[in-house]
Image (cartoon, helix red, strand yellow):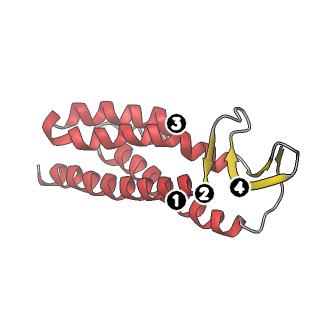
Amino acid sequence: MRNRFKTKGRDKWAEYIGKTILCFGDIEFITFECLINFSQDNIFKSTSNLSLNPRIGLIINIVENRFDKEVCAKFISLLNEVIKQAQKRNLIAHNPLNLDIYEDEIGDISEFKEVIYSLRNYDTKVSFDELISFYESVHSLSESLTKEYQFLYNKLVLE
């Protein structure tokens, strides 16, 4: 049985959902900085409305044409990781917290579990432990992407 209602555990979820979304905000910021600073043309105005994945695809093309392959390989790898992680971010950001109620073989309630389910596909879900792990991964990704962006930006400035 699947029910959607406010649970006592929402605050612990809110903390990690918030932290995760803030990390993705930092990542989004880096992508806009790339459009402004790495493109040789003034494309920011015409591309700033792109959603994250197409924006990253464009940035990868710009970076590949602006820097030597060895210099930008790690940055591109991190951008590709962002694309992979964005799907789970969307799941977390756009779906409600649910309470799964499990019954034993005679119909008595045996267990409760809080999870975030995709409203489009109930097989796609995130547990609280998975959320914490995802936040830690995204935080690390955000920090690494920021460092690599700064490295590339400094290369441009020093040229």
Nearer to us of marks 4 and 1 is 4
Quarter of the view holding residue 122: top right
131 shown above or below 54: below
Q: What is the number of the mark on residue 114?
A: 4
Amino acid found under the numbered disc labelled 3 = Leu
Using a 10 Å C-alpha cutoff, classify the residue at mark 1 as few (fewer than 14 neighbours), some (14 to 19) or many (20 or more).
some
Q: Compare residues 87 and 9 and report the one nearer the observer.
A: 9
Name the mark on residue 128. 2
Mark 2 near mark 3, Cβ–Cβ under 8 Å? Answer: no
Where residue 53 appears, x then y in whole percent? Answer: 48, 35
| Position in image of residue 75 (x %, y %) | 27, 44
Residue most extreme to the front: 106
Of the residues shown, which amino acid type is indicated by label 2? Answer: Phe
Question: Mark 4 or mark 3, which has the lower sequence index?
Answer: 3
Res 39 visible: no
Image point (81%, 61%), residue name: 6
* Residue displayed at 77% across by 69% down: 8
Label at residue 50:
3
Question: Is label 2 in a helix, a strand or a loop?
Answer: helix
Please indicate whether residue 137 sits to the left or right of residue 9 in the image. left
Q: Which residue in the rendered view is the most extreme toward the left?
A: 159
Instruction: Point out the tag, 2 or 3, that comes first from the N-terminus.
Output: 3
- Crowding around mark 3 (Cα neighbors within 10 Å: few <14, some 14 to 19, many 20+) is few
Q: Are marks 2 and 4 in contact (CB under 8 Å)?
A: yes
Quadrant where the N terminus sits is top right
Rounded to the nearest angstrom, the CA distance separating label 2 from label 4 is 7 Å
Q: Secondary structure at mark 4?
A: strand
Residues at marks 2 and 1 touching, judged by CB atoms closer than 8 Å: yes
Residue at horizontal 82%, vertical 42%? 105
* Residue holding disc 1: 132
- Three-letter residue code for mark 4: Glu
**Front one among 89 and 34:** 89
